[in-house]
Amino acid sequence: MGPRILFFGYSEVGYECLSLLLERGDNVVALISHEDNPNEKIWFKTPAVAARERGIPVHTPENVNTPECRERIAALQPELILSVYYRHMIGTKILGLARLGAWNMHGSLLPRYRGRAPINWAVLHGETRIGMTLHRMVARADAGAIVDQVGVEIGPRDTAEQAFRKVLPCARRVLARQIDALLAGTVRETPQDETQATYFGGRKAEDGRILWSQSSRQIFNLVRAVTDPYPGAFADVGGARLMVWWAEEDTPATRGRRGAPGEVLAVDPLVVATGDGALELTRTEWRGGTIPQLRPGVRL
């Protein structure tokens, strides 16, 4: 058997990378993952599926950094630690257990977009290229030296899920060409350029609130960054919430239209003024409360 691999992971990126190791016959001794959140729409495969199909033990501790959990991990005698979309920070005492190092697959072209939800943040900021990066794990999130990365182009109308589907194969590609070097302890590393680093935190449902004073492009990017299967962009009107699942910047109904930000300019189709023009809200849903009667001049 080869070196003992302890795999931390979640999401479909974790599923793909763990599946690669199992297909190769690598010596994966356990998977440490997360229980699915009943309040989260689980639209992706998770590595627990791949692990259980091969009889790999699956552990889902709430906190891996407790003394008790560290003892259980030490008992597994990991020689290499691989983390792929695991959602919690792994302490240095655990990282130091693996003689071949601890490595993470991150969903951005580091050093940009360190932190949580990098693909959503990249879409929100209008990026045209995203990627996957394999790097050494250190005390600071996503700050360790880079081993390899692969990028892919995304379009100006791609949703975050579409962007995710485009970049997903990059993770498996990176791992496939580096796993033998990881197991042999011969990988080459390049320190990150700290002057180029950016960091973004995890996104909450409340972060989907639309600020109508922003430009039409900024609001459009928010909509595509958080539309289904994510929680969605929204505006509260009275006691009801208007979910905006899609919008368009340039339509016959928006051209030449201006008003106070958030002002309803037309109802059929629904057109709302932004900081620099107007958006046509093409796919919406009302939630909660009494649905208000929208008419031109009403402010969202």
Image (spheres, rainbow, N blue to C red):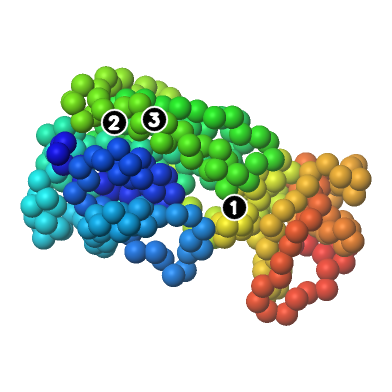
Marks 1, 2: nearer the viewer = 2
Quarter of the image where the C terminus is located: bottom right
Q: Identify the amino acid type marked 3.
A: Val
Q: Secondary structure at mark 1?
A: helix
Mark 2 vs 3, N-terminal side: 3
Give the x, y percent position of residue 243. 68, 63
Local packing at callout 1 (Cα closer than 10 Å; few below 14, some 14-19, many 20+) is: many
Q: Nearer the viewer, residue 214 or 180?
A: 180
Mark-to-mark CA distance, 1 and 2: 33 Å
Q: Quadrant of residue 158?
A: top right
Local packing at callout 2 (Cα closer than 10 Å; few below 14, some 14-19, many 20+) is: some
Q: Quadrant of residue 5?
A: top left
Residue at image mark 2: 179
Mark 1 vs 2, N-terminal side: 2
Do labels 1 and 2 touch, CB within 8 Å? no
Give the x, y percent position of residue 79. 14, 38
Can residue 284 be seen here? The reply is yes
Residue 190 vs 140, above or below: the answer is: above
Q: Secondary structure at mark 3?
A: helix
Q: Secondary structure at mark 2?
A: helix
79 sits left or right of 235 in the view:
left
Residue at image mark 3: 174
Q: Identify the amino acid type marked 1.
A: Val
Q: Nearer the viewer, residue 226 or 32?
A: 32
Query: Residue pushed farthest bottom?
Result: 290
Residue 18 vs 100, above or below: the answer is: below
Q: Residue at x 28, y 21 (%)?
A: 189
* Numbered mark located on residue 226 in the image: 1
5 sits left or right of 239 in the view:
left
